[in-house]
Image (cartoon, rainbow, N blue to C red):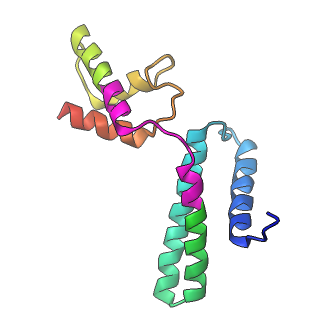
Amino acid sequence: MRAKDTNRLNVVRGILNEVTNSSKTSAPIKTDMQLLSLLRKKASASETAKKEFEAAGRSDLIEKEDAQLNVLDEYAGGVQTWTDDQVRDAVAAAIQDMKSSGSKIVVGDVLKRLFAPGGDLDGKPVEKAKVSVAVKQLLS
């Protein structure tokens, strides 16, 4: 922060503030995926603010939000997650296991099996939205 990059400094302070506040709740941020979710939520809020500033014609604030979005995207890109192929392979294996056991295959049951304690994706750096999309694609 010696470089006096105020945009980056403000974003990092905001993230640290959110993490500190969440540590005082029943759902503290402990994993990279929770941090990624926080970063995406802040990016979404910044994107919404940018659209409102565009509607109001505030170019100075639009530039500020663009800079914040760039920093948030940079940090979000640093979180390592499973690729789509890895997710699809894990989902296909779970569906195959369920078919071989003769149980009825429903999207919710597949997701429960994957994310249950001891499941294939339990504690893994996987976005649940990607998994849900992969399950729906493989079941259709």
Residue 102 shows up from this direction: no
Outermost residue toward the left in this view = 140
* Residue 101 appears left or right of 86: left
Q: Residue at x 74, y 71 (%)?
A: 6
**Quadrant occupied by the C terminus:** top left
In the image shown, does 116 or 71 lie closer to the viewer?
71
The stretch in magenta equals 72-91
Majority secondary structure of magenta residues: helix
As drawn, 1 above or below 110 = below
- Comparing 31 with 105, the one in front is 31
Outermost residue toward the bottom in this view = 57
Q: Residue at x 46, y 86 (%)?
A: 55
Quadrant for the N terminus in the image:
bottom right
**Point 55% across, 88% down: residue:** 59
Q: Percent position (x, y) of residue 8? A: 69, 65
Q: Is residue 78 magenta?
A: yes
Residue 120 magenta-highlighted: no
Q: Is residue 119 above or below residue 126?
A: above
Residue 51 in the image: x percent, y percent? 47, 77
Please provide percent x and percent y for residue 97: 28, 14
Q: Quadrant of residue 33?
A: top right
Based on the displayed image, in which of its 4 quarters is residue 108 positioned?
A: top left
Residue 52 in percent (x, y) is at 50, 80
Number of disc labels: 0
